[in-house]
Image (cartoon, coloured by chain):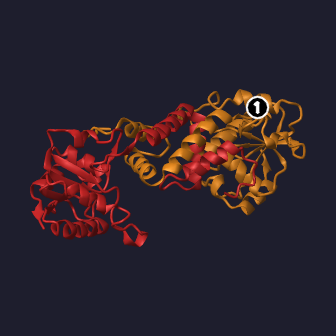
Chain colours: A red, B orange
């Protein structure tokens, strides 16, 4: 920041910190800082605490790789779920969408990303070895690839399909009921339920 | 949030807290939360601390109403500034822009907002009584109105002009060199310097 004004240090630090949020530039960060400090001190306080407790209290579920407070998350620990089915999604938001379709009773694995070789995110960054370990428990029979229907999501699905079929697993992909080019998070639950039902084996 | 998934509590709280930021909806908040927790734990930590220390360490300068660590901010305490000139701005960002024009050596008063009657922000919410007290110190001779050249900014300037002239002060407005309809924060410093020079008395 090229601020010629002797801005108080805590304000400068706050603006710098807000810029770490994705999609937030210096002007947005400034507006956010002013807004919080002027009109919503309790919001600033709440956000500070929520961040601290999330940093402290959240870890990755050792089974599905999603965010969890315990070693194993509630979904993975649920005995009513079918452990022979494993649905692979990019993010917890995608998992939420699939849950909201009420069309799936199996378990999940959250990649926490997608293959984007141009940005240096390869199989190693996404810890595919951990995924391989997860699907090799002898219980998982079928893996449903539910990555986004974007270029990167399709690439990830294709790569995983090769990888997992080579290990003798049945691999399927959500049916093309999901409009091509869109992201799961923005699709209505009915379409997702239909796509689950019509999933095709690859 | 209509999350059917048993989402870990710290994550839900973080998403809720991020939504307090201006212009951030539930989807953006989710993405921000995932991003911080997955790729930038140190950023989350930094933001948490910055918020806490800003909440703790910042207050309003008793003279200019801007953010300050001390009772009186560095600008107001600077003996080299001309105390007979008082420039009224909407936000600290606007003050920064005027400083960067190097065209002004007087003092400031930061409104921390503008008159927006439709949103219930009137003279009382902006503490105009405090401003009146500030300009009545017997030292201020001229007040320069540097609110934005938007509808609300013009309304605020008009209102303040009436209010302050009734108290025998010389009141001026930044010259119309600033393109109408735009906000100070986005104008180049040269234009602002010119507008300061050409300020017209109202």
Which residue occupies 55% across, 56% down? A25
The answer to which of A158 and A38 lies nearer the viewer is: A158
Rendered view: B130 above or below B177: above
Q: Quadrant of the C terminus of chain B?
A: top right
Identity of the residue drawn at 69% across and 41% down: B157
Q: Residue furthest bottom?
A: A118
Q: Quadrant of residue A26?
A: bottom right
Residue B178: image quadrant is bottom right
Quadrant of the rendering where the N terminus of chain B is positioned: top left
Residue at image mark 1: B62
Q: Residue at x 57, y 49 (%)?
A: A17
User: x%, y% of residue B19?
Assistant: 44, 41
Dot 1, crowdedness within 10 Å: few (<14), some or many (≥20)?
Answer: some
Callout 1: residue from which chain? B
Q: Is residue B90 visible?
A: no
How far across and how far down the image is residue B41, in percent? 48, 49
Which element is circle 1 on? loop
Q: How many marks?
A: 1
For the point 22% across and 58% down, the residue is: A146
Q: Is residue A102 visible?
A: yes
Residue B2: x and y in percent read 28, 38
Q: Nearer the viewer, residue B46 or B61?
A: B46
Q: Is residue B153 left or right of residue A56?
A: right
């Amino acid at each position: 920041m090229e601020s010629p004004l002797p801005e108080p240090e805590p304000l400068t630090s706050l603006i710098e910190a807000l810029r770490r949020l994705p999609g937030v530039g210096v002007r947005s960060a400034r507006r956010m800082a002013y807004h919080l400090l002027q009109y919503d001190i309790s919001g600033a306080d709440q956000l500070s605490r929520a961040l601290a407790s999330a940093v402290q209290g959240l870890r990755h579920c050792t089974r599905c790789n999603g965010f969890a407070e315990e070693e194993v998350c509630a979904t993975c620990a649920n005995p009513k779920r079918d452990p022979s089915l494993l649905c692979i999604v990019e993010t917890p938001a995608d998992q939420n969408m699939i849950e909201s379709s009420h069309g799936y009773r199996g378990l999940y694995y959250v990649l926490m990303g997608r293959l984007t070789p141009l940005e240096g995110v390869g199989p190693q960054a996404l810890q595919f070895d951990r995924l391989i370990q997860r699907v090799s428990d002898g219980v998982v029979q079928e893996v449903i690839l539910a990555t986004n229907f974007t270029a990167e999501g399709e690439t990830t699905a294709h790569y995983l399909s090769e990888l997992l079929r080579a290990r003798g697993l049945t691999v399927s992909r959500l049916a093309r009921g999901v409009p091509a080019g869109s992201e799961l998070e923005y699709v209505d639950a009915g379409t997702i339920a239909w796509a689950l039902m019509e999933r095709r084996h690859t």
